[in-house]
Amino acid sequence: MTNTRLPLGSSHRNQWQVNAAQCDLVRVNRTARPLALPALPQNIVIDLARTALIVIDMQNDFCHPQGWLASIGVDVAPARQPIKPLQAVLPTLRSLRVPVLWLNWGNRPDKLNLSPSALHVYNGDGQSVGLGDVLPGAPCDASQNHMLQAGSWGAAVVNELVKAPTDISIDKYRMSGFQDTCLDSVLRNLDIQTILFAGVNADQCVLATLMDANFSGYDCVLLQDCSATTSPSFCWDSTLYNVRQCFGFTALSTGLLT
């Protein structure tokens, strides 16, 4: 039997070294990689070695012209605005070894983890197209067009944004991606301290997830040009105000294009 200690852990950022006789609980001391980033209400310095990007709900049902939001008469043009800046910044962040997490709404087919109050948000009268219901007119096979259902066309990231093999995908079932998901466990295993937020809707799922991240002790930065909302403009203004006032910072992704 060898006395060589072997790594034990799902992430190289959070591993023990073990053999039959001993468990070494000392994690590898990773060198900080500071990056100065113009931001509001103050400029900040982030540690790229402990930073991740979370892209929220950039998926067909919210952003595609034939998705659910468009089907109920919502102009999805604002929801598509983050696509171009994300296309620019994603390769840079990956080259800097910053983890990219895709946090998409993807409910269970049986909806057993969704309360009536969660279902009511998308089906207020009980007879509209709501979570898990068939979305008429979706450009896909009928078996794949259940609204925001995990594995469906509507829950998939829009074609213009390509996930890399190293990216991480997590399904969520509430406005906040921390509720009833593995998001926090994944971030802890990646040794993340600072989270960059992007996606839609900025005043709903993005803000709810960012607030929960703040409550959990993470440093939060909303990438303003990589986020958007189909809500009225005062909702966007309120989101920026509240993030800067209470929950973190706002910045432009161009500050990351080093």
Image (cartoon, grey):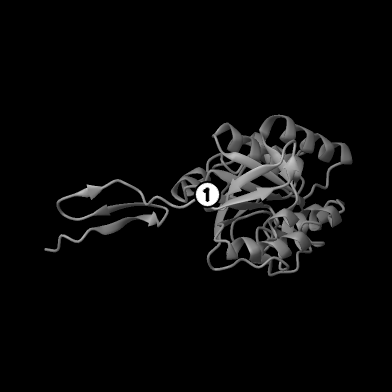
Q: Which residue is nearer to you in this view: 133 or 103? A: 103
- Establish if 74 lies above or below 178: below
Q: Residue at x 31, y 46 (%)?
A: 26
Q: Which residue is mark 1?
A: 50
Answer whether residue 252 is visible to the viewer in this image.
Answer: yes
> Which amino acid type corresponds to the residue marked 1 in the rendered image?
Arg
Residue 94 % position (x, y): 59, 63
Q: Residues within 10 Å of mark 1 (few under 14, many from 20)?
A: many
Q: Residue at x 58, y 44 (%)?
A: 194
Q: Which residue is nearer to you in this view: 12 or 78? A: 12
- Establish if 77 lies above or below 234: below
Please indicate whether residue 218 sits to the left or right of residue 86 in the image: left
- Callout count: 1
Residue 256 % position (x, y): 68, 56
Q: Residue at x 66, y 49 (%)?
A: 36
Answer whether residue 122 is visible to the viewer in this image.
Answer: no
* Residue at the outermost left position: 1
Image quarter of the C terminus: bottom right
Residue 110 % position (x, y): 56, 49
